[in-house]
């Protein structure tokens, strides 16, 4: 970290660990910007050039009647642990991941260092995609398996099979944990977990929250 460059903290964890909720909690209260890579990914999938390239690689069956990407159909093609899933996921990532990274870097570069003390980058595949290379630190958000499953089934409506297929496309939790700079427990109330995350942010980025715009 040097000059006016804003530090970037990547957030990783299991599906349903609550990374997005924690990042938003902190960003709503402190001079921190939360970037949701999954949301950027959804926007990238709407770009005509990306649609064209994905259609060339994966065929027409990933499109809806309007000729746009059907995310549910695409998910069935790329999430799973078979060789076919793996091959299709690689084709998807080769097209989409560079676009997402460029958008992340543009967003960070456009922020005002006098108003933002750090960025929380929430990305389900932060480590798998190599986006941790644009991060100064990585935080692992921890939550018990039963709680993560409850969050997924109640909030996203995923079946156990859907969760298993998507989890197969990510690193094992212990590998993610070992790659992290710090850990935050998110098993309790959001205010407690959010405060823990903010404390970790302040430890990793000394002075964060003490400048203009601090809350």
Image (cartoon, helix red, strand yellow):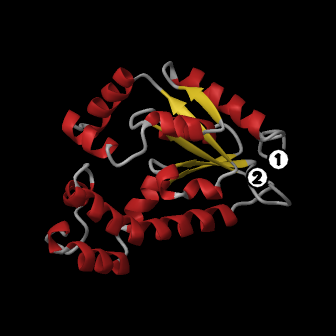
Residue 12 drawn at (x, y percent) = 52, 41
Does residue 128 appear to the left or right of 162 in the view shown?
right
> Quarter holding the C terminus?
top right
Quarter of the figure with residue 90: bottom left
Q: What is the secondary structure assignment of the residue under circle 1?
A: loop
Residue 110 drawn at (x, y percent) = 68, 66
Q: CA distance from mark 2 to mark 1?
A: 6 Å
Q: Is residue 4 visible?
A: yes
> Quarter holding the N terminus?
bottom right
- From the image, tell me which residue sits under label 2: 115
Which numbered dot is residue 212? Answer: 1
Label 2 with label 1: CB-CB less than 8 Å: yes
Quarter of the figure with residue 200: top right
Quarter of the figure with residue 55: bottom left
Q: For mark 1, does the 10 Å Cα neighbourhood hold few (<14), some (14 to 19), or many (20 or more) residues?
A: few
> What residue is shown at x 36% (from left), y 76% (from top)?
50
């Amino acid at each position: 970290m040097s000059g006016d460059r804003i530090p970037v903290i990547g957030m990783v964890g299991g599906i349903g660990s609550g990374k997005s909720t924690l990042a938003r909690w902190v960003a709503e209260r402190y001079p921190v910007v939360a970037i949701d890579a999954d949301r950027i990914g959804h926007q990238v999938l709407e770009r005509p050039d990306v649609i064209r390239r994905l259609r060339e690689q994966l065929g027409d069956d990933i499109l809806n009647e309007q000729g746009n990407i059907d995310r549910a159909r695409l998910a069935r093609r790329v999430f799973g642990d078979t060789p076919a899933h793996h091959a299709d996921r690689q084709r998807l990532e080769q097209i989409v991941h560079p676009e997402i990274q460029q958008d992340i870097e543009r967003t960070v570069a456009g922020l005002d260092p006098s108003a933002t003390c750090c960025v929380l980058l929430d990305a389900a595949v932060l480590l798998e995609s190599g986006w941790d290379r644009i991060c100064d630190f990585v935080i692992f958000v921890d939550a018990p398996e039963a709680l993560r499953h409850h969050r997924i089934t109640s909030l996203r409506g995923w079946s156990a099979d859907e969760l298993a297929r998507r989890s197969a496309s990510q690193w094992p939790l212990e590998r993610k944990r070992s790659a992290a700079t710090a850990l935050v427990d998110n098993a309790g109330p959001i205010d407690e977990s959010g405060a823990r995350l903010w404390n970790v942010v302040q430890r990793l980025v000394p002075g964060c929250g003490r400048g203009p715009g601090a809350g």
